[in-house]
């Protein structure tokens, strides 16, 4: 008789999700689904709000990547203002975005995934965590904490807070950078780069232990979507959209981000509160693509900083002549991007223009529609707003980095489960591998909850005394 295995919750990710594995009569995996089970609805919350509130409001989507939403939202609001941002304002925004990239990638690699990589996929789950990592390799655990601290400290020094800084605003930023803070930030970066390079070398030594996982952790042909610079370089703040196929052929290039709607469609499935974006010319679900560090390194022609470019050559040697296809190698790409972020932050802080005092352009709403696109740690992030003549939000659509990867994550879960899970001889390490596939993508599920779906839903109205006075239930 056919059976179902439920992994609930999926552990060591940001947000709430579960996985359902459907077994056939022989006990083998026939199908698998990745379910995002939390509902947020930020697009509706935004309606009726003055558009200058949008960066601070949408940043509350998540406490892990608020800076990413500040960037994309501020850029959408810049579009509404129809202004040119002062150069120092652009550089300061870039700086905070890179600090966010470094700290978020450090969280993913060191805190969420490194226990699997160092202790093993079949290790004792009671030890397969940060505390177990501390007991086996205290230096690696401390490196992860310190690297994340450097990124968070730079965010705090720029914006006043590590989480939800109110510093990035429509038109630029609200405060210039003081010279003393600039020097303090510069002083931290050599240590961070040393940690990142050391970790990259250590990870290379572990990869040979995971040949089977590399082969079956989301290893399939897809498209890849990201921003690139006009010269084809690695880009996170601004740039143009590029899409490559699995053979490395560029099929869309130098597309202005404001024209994303010609490329990206959005589907909804009943088993998840996360949308399913797809490449429109290929249709749904054939238009599957991936975003994030794997896609960015597959798409770019170069990084543009010396240490990162040297590691990019090693990354491309993983699959010579073609884009790297295994989602296991998101880890490789993440470490290279940390190196790039630290090198690029140093370049920005050494630029005298970053200390300029003119950091914001001011205007009222001069357009009724604005689009902001940036690269979040997890991939391409799109904020699209419409306002009325009074500057009040009438419509918002957020296409979240994790959402772009939704089709790929579901296919990856199915691929890994079909290979590793035997319903007749089940053990924990099999299921951990299915979860580990999801961790490769580092999903941010609080951000990605933007579709109604058809899953069970209960809403209760509770009075001050704690009594339920009304309830709506959808089965």
Image (cartoon, rainbow, N blue to C red):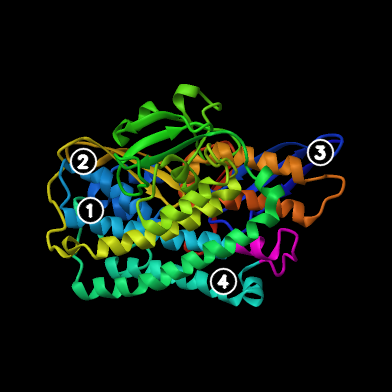
Mark 2 or mark 3, earlier in chain: 3
Mark 2 or mark 1, earlier in chain: 2
Residue 231 drawn at (x, y percent): 30, 40
Residue carrying label 3? 28
Residue carrying label 2? 80
Q: In this rendering, which labeled residue sits more in front, label 3 or label 4? A: 4
The residues colored magenta run: 113-128
Is residue 118 rendered magenta in the image? yes
Residue 391 visible in the displayed image: no
Q: In this rendering, which labeled residue sits more in front, label 4 or label 2? A: 4
Mark 4 or mark 1, earlier in chain: 1
Q: In this rendering, which labeled residue sits more in front, label 2 or label 3? A: 3
Tell me the CA gap for discs 3 and 4: 38 Å
Question: In front: 165, or 222?
Answer: 222
Q: Which quadrant of the view contains residue 177?
A: bottom left
Residue 270 drawn at (x, y percent): 59, 34
Question: In front: 153, or 19?
Answer: 153
Q: Residues within 10 Å of mark 3 (few under 14, many from 20)?
A: many
């Amino acid at each position: 008789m056919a059976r179902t295995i439920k992994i609930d919750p999926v552990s060591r990710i940001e947000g709430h999700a579960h996985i359902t594995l459907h077994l056939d009569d022989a006990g083998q995996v026939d199908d698998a689904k990745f379910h995002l089970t939390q509902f947020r609805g930020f697009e509706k919350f935004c309606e009726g709000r003055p558009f200058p509130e949008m960066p601070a409001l949408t940043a509350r989507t998540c406490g892990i990547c608020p800076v990413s939403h500040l960037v994309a939202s501020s850029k959408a609001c810049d579009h509404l203002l129809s202004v040119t941002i002062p150069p120092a304002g652009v550089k300061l925004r870039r700086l905070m975005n890179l600090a966010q990239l470094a700290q978020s990638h450090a969280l993913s690699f060191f805190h969420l995934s490194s226990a699997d990589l160092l202790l093993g996929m079949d290790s004792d789950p009671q030890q397969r965590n940060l505390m177990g990592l501390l007991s086996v390799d205290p230096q690696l655990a401390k490196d992860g904490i310190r690297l994340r601290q450097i990124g968070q400290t730079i965010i705090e020094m720029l914006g006043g807070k590590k989480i939800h800084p109110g510093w990035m605003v429509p038109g630029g930023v609200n405060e210039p950078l003081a010279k003393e803070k600039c020097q303090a930030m510069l002083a931290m970066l050599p240590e961070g780069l040393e940690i990142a390079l050391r970790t990259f070398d250590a990870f290379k030594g572990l990869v040979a232990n995971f040949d089977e996982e590399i082969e079956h952790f989301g290893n399939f042909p897809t498209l890849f979507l990201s921003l690139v610079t006009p010269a084809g370089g690695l880009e996170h703040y601004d740039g143009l959209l590029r899409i490559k196929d699995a053979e490395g052929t560029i099929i869309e290039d130098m597309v202005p981000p404001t024209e994303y709607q010609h490329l990206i469609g959005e589907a909804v499935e009943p088993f998840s509160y996360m949308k399913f974006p797809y490449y429109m010319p290929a249709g749904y679900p054939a238009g599957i693509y991936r975003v994030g560090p794997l896609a960015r390194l597959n798409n770019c022609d170069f990084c543009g900083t010396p240490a990162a470019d040297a590691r990019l050559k090693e990354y491309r040697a993983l699959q010579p002549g073609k884009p790297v296809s295994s989602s296991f190698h998101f880890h490789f790409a993440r470490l290279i991007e940390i190196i790039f972020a630290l090198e690029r932050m140093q370049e920005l802080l050494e630029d005298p223009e970053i200390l300029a005092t003119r950091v914001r352009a001011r205007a009222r709403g001069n357009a009724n529609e604005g689009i902001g696109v940036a690269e979040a740690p997890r991939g391409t992030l799109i904020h699209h707003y419409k306002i009325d003549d009074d500057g009040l939000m009438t419509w918002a659509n957020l296409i979240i980095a994790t959402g772009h990867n939704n089709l790929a994550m579901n296919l990856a879960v199915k691929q890994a489960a079909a290979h590793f899970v035997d319903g007749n001889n089940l053990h924990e390490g099999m299921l951990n591998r299915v979860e580990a596939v999801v961790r490769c993508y580092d999903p941010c599920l609080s951000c990605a909850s933007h579709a109604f779906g058809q899953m069970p839903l209960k809403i209760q109205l509770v009075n001050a005394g704690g009594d339920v006075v009304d309830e709506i239930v959808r089965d």
